[in-house]
Amino acid sequence: MNRMSNPTRGYYAEDACDIGEFAALVLQDIDPSDVPHAAETPNNVPVYDIPALSAHLEEAAQRRILMTEWANVLRKGAGVFVLGHAYTDTSAIDAATAIFDQIIAREKTANGGGADHFAAAGSNDRIWNSLQKLCEADPETFLRYHANPAVDAACEAWLGPHYQMTAQVNLVHPGGAAQQAHRDYHLGFQTAEVSAQFPAHVHDLSPLMTLQGGIAHGDTPLEGGPTKLLPFSQLYRPGYAAWRREDFRAFFEDHHVQVPLQKGDALFFNPALFHAAGANCSADIHRMVNLLQVSSAFGRAMETVNRLKMCKLVFDPLKQLVSTGELGGAELDATIAATAEGYSFPTNLDSDPPANGLAPQTQAALLKESVLDSISAEAFHHALDAQEARKQA
């Protein structure tokens, strides 16, 4: 039994990941009996003809049967599916595309545009928080765009009701390079060092808290660079530790698949699936996808806590206790964990972009850094307020 298979191993380490175990999970084929409602399964990706399934989405019992199938695909099957013609009427997509083009032009003029987490700056155009920005620009178009029962059912299938929708537009121009293979939010947005601090069962939990999706705003044939996918790769439990390794990324490049999309199609996948945006090798396709990042309603605390106020109150006493040696090391970390916000998200990625990694600095990190640097309370309050202001949409 190798180290990765040992059920008593409570944490995952990058150097202990086993490419052989990974390959054994990934190199399999869909059982058609697992996806009875799929119209086809090109390259092991189930594709559903949504107009043909409209009656299933309208009747409660049939809708649950379909959602159960989608949830099983995401968790135990290929890990990805396509809703073909999710938008039978694409007029709302066209209206949203025109608005997104205006936003991109305006933001590029103002600040040069947004960067990508997993692609080189300049290879694409990005709109952070396209959900709110579309609503602010044209509330009626926003309503028509999101009045989609198939998309709603896909989100509820994985997350249950009361999910929280967020979205980000990614526009890749002809010649735009591919992303690197990766996993996604939550643990996929942490550095390898941070990810390794979370116990193995949290690696299992992370993908259950989020659904990744994308709505195609134009036809995307293979030369346009549709998302590169590795079906079944979400089944490899240590994948959040493994995806940065060169042998795993090489395996991904050798075995990934791509599915052409038409305007109005929607793609959904488990965030633990190894994936990457493809290279746009076309001469004239400007590939726009509105990326949906949908979160479980359960990813929130029970009480509202004013941690900004608490950080300001404890700063001077904490600095004093550290300076006298009464607090330090593990005790200092425990105190900060009880006081400050230790997670970077949610935030406004326009004004609070990732710094030195995949996520912005946390409130807890700022508090600890300021205490150890023994800066003045006034300077700390200013830095804390500035950090809070950057997070506001």
Image (cartoon, rainbow, N blue to C red):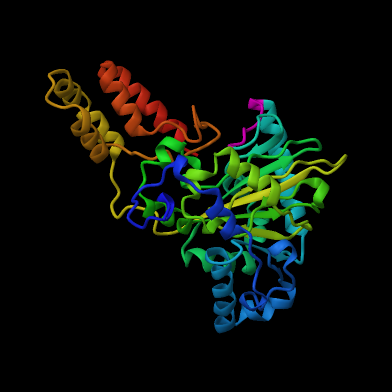
Judged left or right of residue 167, residue 383 is left
345 over 364 or under it: above or below: below
259 left or right of 13? right
Image location of residue 223, percent across then percent down: 83, 47
Residue positioned 68% across, 55% down in the render: 215
Q: Nearer the viewer, residue 158 or 177?
A: 177
Query: 390 and 322: which one is in front?
Result: 322
Residue 107 visible from this viewpoint:
yes
Q: Which secondary structure is most common in the magenta stretch?
A: loop
Residue nearer the viewer, 110 or 365:
365
**Looking at the image, which residue is at 43% across and 51% down?**
4
Residues in magenta? 110-117
* Image-quadrant location for residue 103: top right
Residue 362 location in percent, x, y?
Answer: 38, 34
User: At x 20% / y 30%, what residue is drawn?
Assistant: 314
Q: Is residue 111 magenta?
A: yes
Kindly identify the residue that appears in the image at 21 percent across and 33 percent down. 330
Residue 200, magenta (yes or no): no
Q: Residue furthest right?
A: 283
Residue 234 placement: quadrant: bottom right
| Vertical side of 375 occupied by 228: above or below | below
Indicate the position of residue 166 as horizontal and vertical percent values. 55, 50
Q: Quadrant of the N terminus?
A: bottom left
Q: Position of residue 310 (x, y in %)?
A: 24, 35
